[in-house]
Amino acid sequence: MTTMQIKRALVRVDIQNGFMPLDPGIPGTGELPVEGAPAIVAAVNALSRSPFFDLVVDTQDYHPADHGSFYTMHPGKSANEVVDLFGLSQILWNPHCRQNTPGCEFYPTLDRSRVAKVIQKGTDKTVDSYSGFWDNGKRKSTGLADYLVSEGVTHVYVVGVTRPFCPSWTAIDSAEAGFKTFLVVDACSLLELAPGAGETDLLALRGKQVEIVSSSDILGQTA
Ligand SMILES: [Zn+2]
């Protein structure tokens, strides 16, 4: 008789300088600032240090300088406008997390001591990549699912920057890939371009078999 062994991965999405509010002491901050993003780092670090997890993975938004999601690549357009980008609806963003700049580096207070793997995304200038698993058109995989399978991972816990975008898309793709998937809501930042977007996101996640949990649910189990 065999028993399926549970192996848990903590997938930390895009905790990078470019998404943090401007801090004059940290180069690269303020590019695409998300209020509340620095506040998740303490919870993310506590989770990352917990023996509850067998594996810690970071995703990294890693754009070429001329990425098509940047409003600066679309003359006459501004941030938050929506365009068609090679057949996909694309929200335009401030330029952020460009390769080989301080903006793409991980936030300095993020504890990276247990990180086993970094998965880069958004490297193709013709398509954005919110999910850590796929670009937004599901044209090309990042290799994250194959990596987790090769490590024997069964359960995936998603944290990071910023709902309802990258962590949410990552969690939905994780569930779709067959992992039992959880989103740790207090360890995700939130950017509501429209009022109520956060609640709508939680409903959508539950609808895709993603369980919503809090870090205290997890840390309580190992305290
Ligand atoms: Zn990006």
Image (cartoon, rainbow, N blue to C red):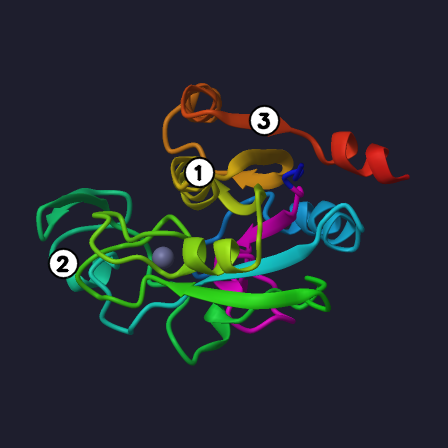
Position of residue 3 relative to residue 9, above or below, is above
Frontmost of labels 1 and 3 is 1
Residue range highlighted in magenta: 5-30
Q: Residue at x 21, y 45 (%)?
A: 90
| Percent position of residue 166, x then y | 42, 46
Q: Is mark 1 within 8 Å of ligand 1?
A: no
The picture quadrant where one finds residue 63 is bottom left
| Residue marked by disc 1 | 178
SS at mark 1 in the image: loop
Classed neighbour count for the residue bearing mark 2: other residues with Cα under 10 Å, few (<14), some (14–19), many (≥20): few
Question: Which amino acid, by three-letter code, is at mark 2?
Answer: His
| Residue marked by disc 2 | 74
| Percent position of residue 216, x then y | 78, 32
| Percent position of residue 15, x then y | 56, 57
User: Looking at this view, is 9 or 46 the one in front?
Assistant: 9
Q: Report the Cα–Cα distance between label 1 and label 2.
A: 38 Å
Q: Report the Cα–Cα distance between label 2 and label 3.
A: 37 Å
Q: Which numbered disc flags the more N-terminal residue, 1 or 2?
A: 2
Q: Report the Cα–Cα distance between label 1 and label 3.
A: 17 Å
The label shown at residue 212 is 3
Question: Which amino acid, by three-letter code, is at mark 1?
Answer: Gly
Where is the C terminus found, in terms of image quarters?
top right
Question: Which amino acid, by three-letter code, is at mark 3?
Answer: Ile
Frontmost of labels 1 and 2 is 1
Q: Is residue 93 magenta?
A: no
Left or right of 125 on screen, residue 49:
right
- Give the dominant element type of the magenta stretch: helix, strand or loop: loop
Find ligand 1 in the image and state its quadrant. bottom left
SS at mark 2 in the image: loop
Q: Residue at x 22, y 71 (%)?
A: 66
Position of residue 142 relative to residue 11, above or below, is below
